Image (spheres, grey):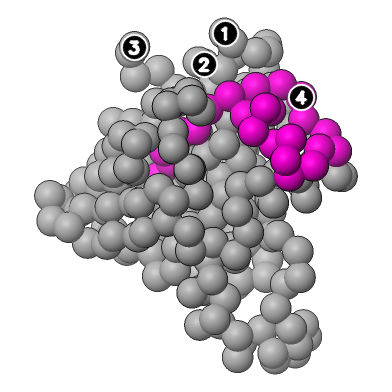
Amino acid sequence: MTQSSLAKQVVTTCTTAAPTVFAIALNSQAQLARLDAVFQQAPYKEPPKTPVIFLQPPSTLNRNGGNVVLPQGENELRIEPHIGVVFAQDTSRITETEVEQYIRGFVPVNLFSLPNDNYYRPDITGRCRDGFCAIGQEVPKHAINNPDQIAIHISVDGQPKKQSEGNKMLRNINQLVSFLSQFMTFRCGDILLVGTDDCPIIVTKNNCVETTFEQLGSVSNTVIEQAR
């Protein structure tokens, strides 16, 4: 298969529109523990009680091998690897035990953003830049054994930088999908990014990032300067 964007792949399978990509923030147990003192401060005075969700607009979608543009005036990007759940059909008000039958497959994702410490309100201007959501090849669900346990390895310019083992999320895939489906509908082909581990890797111009997902394959992207 050519390295067309996942948006185009999904169009031919499900619908006439690009998929909606949803992302979950603050699902890392380690991150929540590290930030507990911050969450106790005003105005919130407690950690979030429900999943924190935000959207990646179609213009953010990128692909394996695609370049990621470092905006003018910025020196660094944050790289967050996510496992993406791809929906097989419209999904609404399902139980945790029903989730698997609504999933078509999984995708590896490199999600880039500008470094920002606003945890309660995801930084839309820092996350929703063109090409910041690089989506790899979809793998059918039957080929994946326990997606909540997938290990992730990140290298920059060929040098290992981080390894994350699976099962470190506060809420697993079935819990997230079931909870969110109670008040919103996932359409066929939509993608849910289920969260990333704590302490993301920081990269800069000319860095080549390769993220390898156990069972899912790799996503590789090069950070380039914005044309002046």
Marks 2 and 4: which is nearer the front? 4
Kindly state the secondary structure of the residue where label 4 is placed: loop
Q: Which residue is mark 2?
A: 8
Q: Residues within 10 Å of mark 1 (few under 14, many from 20)?
A: few
In the picture, the disc for residue 133 is: none
Kindly state the secondary structure of the residue where label 3 is placed: loop
Q: Which residue is mark 4?
A: 90
Q: Nearer the viewer, residue 90 or 7?
A: 90
Task: Name the residue located 75 percent from the left edge and 64 percent from the top edge.
Answer: 50
Task: Please state if 96 lies on the left or on the right of 33 as rendered.
Answer: right
Query: Sequence order check: which comes first, mark 3 or mark 2?
Result: 3
- Write down the region rendered in magenta: 87-111
Which residue type does callout 3 highlight?
Met
Task: Name the residue located 54 percent from the left edge and 61 percent from the top edge.
Answer: 169
Kindly state the secondary structure of the residue where label 1 is placed: helix
Query: Sequence order check: which comes first, mark 1 or mark 3?
Result: 3
CA separation in Å, label 3 and label 2 = 12 Å
Query: Sequence order check: which comes first, mark 2 or mark 4?
Result: 2
Q: Nearer the viewer, residue 150 or 46?
A: 150
Which residue type does callout 1 highlight?
Thr
Q: Is residue 131 visible?
A: no
Evaluate if marks 4 and 3 touch, with contact meaning CB atoms under 8 Å apart.
no
Q: Tell me where residue 43 sits by quadrant.
A: bottom right
Q: Which residue is mark 3?
A: 1
Vertical order, 216 against 81 (above or below)? above
Q: Which residue is mark 1?
A: 12
Q: Nearer the viewer, residue 144 or 89?
A: 144
